[in-house]
């Protein structure tokens, strides 16, 4: 079946640095990818919708200058957490929609900001 | 706004026990409803879905029926196995393609 690869699976960084997370659809082209964030013991929250070739659409309350999303190709979207702070520590998950309108998820990235 | 509320975990069952994980939703219009499963170390996978009222989604022995009158989509399985141990997420997709997830319920099945 379709696979979405997310990298890295775990990253630790110092406060003030930037971290890039990649999301790739391995065997299908995805014009739309989504980025989610999951706080401990809480729901997955949609952060933004990433569309290939255009600017991402951010959910209310999500800082677009802090969470930079680039959907450079039909198989790759990246999320960059700029100037990360401890409160950005979380579990980030991407997903991609196939032509069959099925949403496939990456394994997630655990970000720890020290 | 649209939201999903699911049963808090963790849930611990013995093998062959009956499983129910409750899920209710709030939404305008006619959302599609989903159950996703996340096995340890893996990404979320679609388990089953239902796109309209009274539809029943089923897969791998799991079932859930879209009940509009009670705005519910409870997940059931008649006889769980150790391999069913995972985190289960109830979700809805609205007419704008936006997904909303429940908080997830961790299921542990003991032999």
Image (cartoon, rainbow, N blue to C red):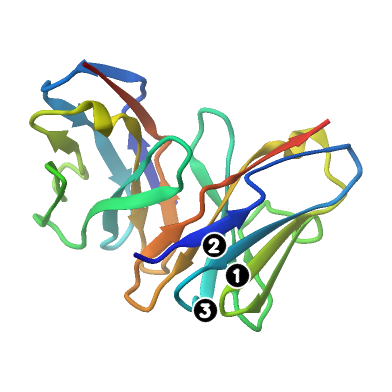
Counting from the top left corner in percent of width and height, residue A40 is at 57, 29
**Residue that sits furthest to the right in the current view:** A16
A61 versus B97 height, above or below? above
Tell me the quadrant of the picture where the C terminus of chain A can be found.
top right
Q: Are marks 1 and 3 in contact (CB under 8 Å)?
A: no
- Is there one chain holding both mark 2 and mark 1? yes
Q: Are marks 2 and 1 in contact (CB under 8 Å)?
A: yes
- Is there one chain holding both mark 3 and mark 2? yes
**Residue depicted at 16% across the width and 20% down the height:** B15
Mark 1 — residue? A50
**Residue depicted at 30% across the width and 20% down the height:** B11
- Is there one chain holding both mark 1 and mark 3? yes
**Residue depicted at 43% across the width and 69% down the height:** A97
Element marked by disc 1: strand
The earlier-in-sequence mark between 1 and 3 is 3
Front position in the image: B110 or B30: B110
Give the Cα separation between the discs numbered 1 and 3. 8 Å
- The numbered disc on residue A34 is 2
Give the Cα separation between the discs numbered 3 and 2. 10 Å
**Residue depicted at 91% across the width and 43% down the height:** A16
Q: Chain of mark 2?
A: A
Residue B62 image-quadrant placement: top left
Dot 2: within a 10 Å radius of its alpha carbon, few (fewer than 14), some, or many (20 or more) residues? many
Tell me the quadrant of the picture where the N terminus of chain A can be found.
bottom left
Mark 3 — residue? A31
Counting from the top left corner in percent of width and height, residue A90 is at 65, 38
A52 versus A22 height, above or below? below
Element marked by disc 2: strand
Q: Chain of mark 1?
A: A
Dot 3: within a 10 Å radius of its alpha carbon, few (fewer than 14), some, or many (20 or more) residues? some
């Amino acid at each position: 079946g379709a696979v979405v690869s997310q990298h890295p699976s775990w990253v630790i960084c110092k406060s003030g640095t930037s971290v890039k997370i990649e999301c790739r659809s391995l065997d299908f082209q995805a014009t739309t990818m989504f980025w989610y964030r999951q706080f401990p013991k809480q729901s997955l929250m949609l952060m933004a919708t990433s569309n290939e070739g255009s600017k991402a659409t951010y959910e209310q309350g999500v800082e677009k200058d802090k969470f930079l999303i680039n959907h450079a190709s039909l198989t790759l979207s990246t999320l960059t957490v700029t100037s990360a702070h401890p409160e950005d520590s979380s579990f980030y998950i991407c997903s991609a929609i196939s032509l069959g309108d099925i949403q496939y998820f990456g394994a997630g990235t655990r970000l720890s900001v020290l | 706004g649209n939201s999903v509320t699911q049963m808090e975990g963790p849930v611990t069952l013995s093998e062959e026990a009956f499983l129910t994980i409750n899920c209710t939703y709030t939404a305008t219009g006619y959302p599609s409803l989903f159950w996703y499963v996340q096995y340890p170390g893996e990404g979320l996978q679609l388990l089953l879905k239902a796109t309209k009222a009274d539809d029943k989604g089923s897969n791998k022995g799991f079932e859930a029926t879209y009940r509009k009158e009670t705005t519910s989509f409870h997940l059931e399985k008649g006889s769980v196995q150790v391999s069913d141990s995972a985190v289960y997420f109830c979700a809805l997709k609205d007419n704008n393609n936006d997904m909303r997830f429940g908080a997830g319920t961790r299921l542990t099945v003991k032999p």
